Image (spheres, rainbow, N blue to C red):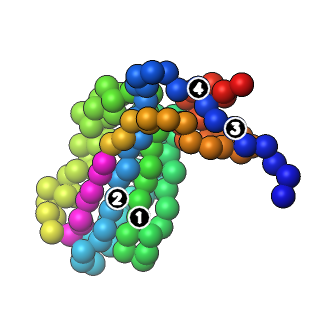
């Protein structure tokens, strides 16, 4: 296998954050809502100011995870106050037992390793030379 790998130059105190957001359907209503809205949620997230990339994955028939990369924690917090996020949460308010939601926020401590085109944090920071 012949490919080049690289790392990125992270500032001493990076502003960027990674947001991990999981959806686990607990009943039929949660299952159908999750699959009906997953593409919309991904698109609404990537269109939000400060979001540079969203990756979505299927963990199982009743679980989906999304990882989004944000320029700053403030941009992520602004998304939480947005109309699309409010719309997403309406289902949870009306059906509090239908979904198990979990989320975590991370800041990078050091560069990961990348190959080929930039993905994730490499879309935010320059390539180390």
Q: Which residue is mark 1?
A: 64
In the picture, measured across the screen, residue 3 lies left or right of residue 78, that is right
Does the magenta-highlighted stretch encompass residue 102?
yes
Q: Residues within 10 Å of mark 3 (few under 14, many from 20)?
A: some
- Where is residue 56? Give x, y as percent: 49, 56
Q: In which quadrant of the rendered view does residue 125 lie?
A: top right
Of mark 2 and mark 1, the one earlier in the sequence is 2
Magenta highlight: main SS: strand
Q: Which residue is mark 2?
A: 22
Identify the element where label 2 is drawn: strand
Please provide the residue range marked out in magenta. 98-104
Instruction: For label 4, count other residues whose C-alpha is less than 10 Å away and answer few (under 14), some (14-19) or many (20+).
Output: some
x, y (%) of residue 42? 45, 49
Mark 1 and mark 3: span between their CA atoms?
29 Å
Q: Mark 4 — residue?
A: 9
Between the residue at mark 4 and the residue at mark 3, the CA separation in whole angstroms equals 10 Å
The reply to whether dot 4 and dot 3 touch (C-beta < 8 Å) is no
* Mark whose residue sits in front, 1 or 3: 3
In this view, the mark in front (1 or 4)? 4
Outermost residue, top side: 12
At 22% from the left and 58% from the top, the residue drawn is 91
Q: CA distance from mark 4 to mark 2?
A: 29 Å
Q: Label 1 neighbourhood size at 10 Å, few (<14), some (14-19), many (20+)?
A: some
Give yes or no for contact between labels 2 and 1 (Cβ–Cβ under 8 Å): yes
SS category of the residue bearing label 1? strand
Residue 32 on image: x %, y %: 34, 71
**Residue in the image at 66% along x and 43% along y:** 114
Q: Is residue 64 above or below residue 83?
A: below
Q: Is residue 124 left or right of residue 23?
A: right
N-term-proximal mark, 4 vs 2: 4
Q: Which residue is mark 3?
A: 6
């Amino acid at each position: 296998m012949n490919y080049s790998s690289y790392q990125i130059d992270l500032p001493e105190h990076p502003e960027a954050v990674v947001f991990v957001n999981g959806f686990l359907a607990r009943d039929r209503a949660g299952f159908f809502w999750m699959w009906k809205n997953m593409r919309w949620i991904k698109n609404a997230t990537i269109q939000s100011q400060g979001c540079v990339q969203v990756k979505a994955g299927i963990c199982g028939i009743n679980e989906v995870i999304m990882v989004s990369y944000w320029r700053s924690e403030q941009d992520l917090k602004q998304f939480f106050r947005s109309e699309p996020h409010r719309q997403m949460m309406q289902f949870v308010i009306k059906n509090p037992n239908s979904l198990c939601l979990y989320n975590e926020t991370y800041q990078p401590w050091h560069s990961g390793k990348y190959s080929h085109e930039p993905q994730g944090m490499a879309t935010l920071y320059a390539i180390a030379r």
